[in-house]
Image: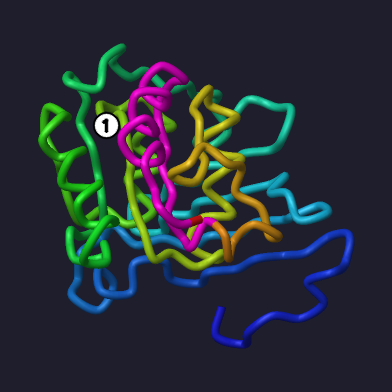
Amino acid sequence: EEDGQVRTDAEYVWVLDPIDGTKSFITGKPLFGTLIACLKNGEPIIGVIDQCVLNERWLGVVGKVTTLNGKPITTAGCSELKESMMYATTPHMFAEGEESDKFKQMCHVVKRPLYGADCYAYAIVASGFGADIVVEADLGLYDYCALVPVLEGAGGVMTDWCGRRLTLSNHETSKGRVIACANAGLHKEAIAILGKSWTRP
């Protein structure tokens, strides 16, 4: 993360975030994690979420079921957006204007918005622990590449706000706006709010 990008045009690219959730880390909240991703031709194919405080490690590999400490996991999730529990790291991550307005619409539709879990929120959704959706913005590649295989391997869906896949090549288009859902039904409802009427890419 801090050393920038090297050979991003290579067939295999590693994306590392040593401490995802820096503010949680420096203030003593044990929800930070280490994120490790491997991309093949720009597509995330392996993802690791490691939570050293709770001794939990999620491993997602394309074509395989995601595991938590070696045991298979699956998303649960409700069937309707109005019943869902939605996470975001902070409401202040959304830029004023359309981005913030879209997030506020989501807050009005879901059962309850929750804040402050960083990468751990995605792990909760993947594990079927009770959270259904994560909506965030202003993320770097290192913030989300590892999360994609973990969510998808558990049965979830993770894209940008317009429903596009999260890849190395479309990061500038997606602008770090991501959504992770426990199932395709919730994802369809959510991107109808987040992506349908955007006036810019």
Q: Is residue 127 left or right of residue 17?
A: left
| Residue 38 picture quarter | bottom right
Tag count in the figure? 1
What residue lies at 50% left-to-right and 30% top-to-bottom?
157
Residue 34: x and y, percent? 48, 63
| Residue 67 picture quarter | top right
Question: What residue sits right under mark 1 in the picture?
Answer: 131
What residue lies at 46% left-to-right and 61% top-to-bottom?
176
Q: Residue furthest right?
A: 11
| Residue 16 picture quarter | bottom right
Whether the magenta-drawn stretch holds residue 186 is answered as yes
Residue 73: x and y, percent? 49, 24
Q: Residue furthest top?
A: 79
What sort of colour scheme is used for the picture?
A: rainbow
Whether the magenta-drawn stretch holds residue 40 is answered as no
Give the SS element for disc 1: loop
What residue lies at 56% left-to-right and 64% top-to-bottom?
141
Amino acid on which disc 1 is placed: Ala
Quadrant where the N terminus sits is bottom right
Residue 25: x and y, percent? 29, 72
- In the image, which residues are magenta? 174-200
In this rendering, the answer to whether 46 lies above or below 36 is: above
Q: Is residue 89 left or right of residue 136?
A: left
Residue 126: x and y, percent? 43, 32
Q: Is residue 129 left or right of residue 29?
A: right
What residue lies at 76% left-to-right and 56% top-to-bottom?
42
In this rendering, the answer to whether 111 lies above or below 48 is: above
Q: Residue furthest front?
A: 199
Mark 1 Cα-neighbour bin, 10 Å: few <14, some 14–19, many ≥20: many
In this rendering, the answer to whether 166 lies above or below 31 is: above
Q: Nearer the viewer, residue 89 or 110?
A: 110
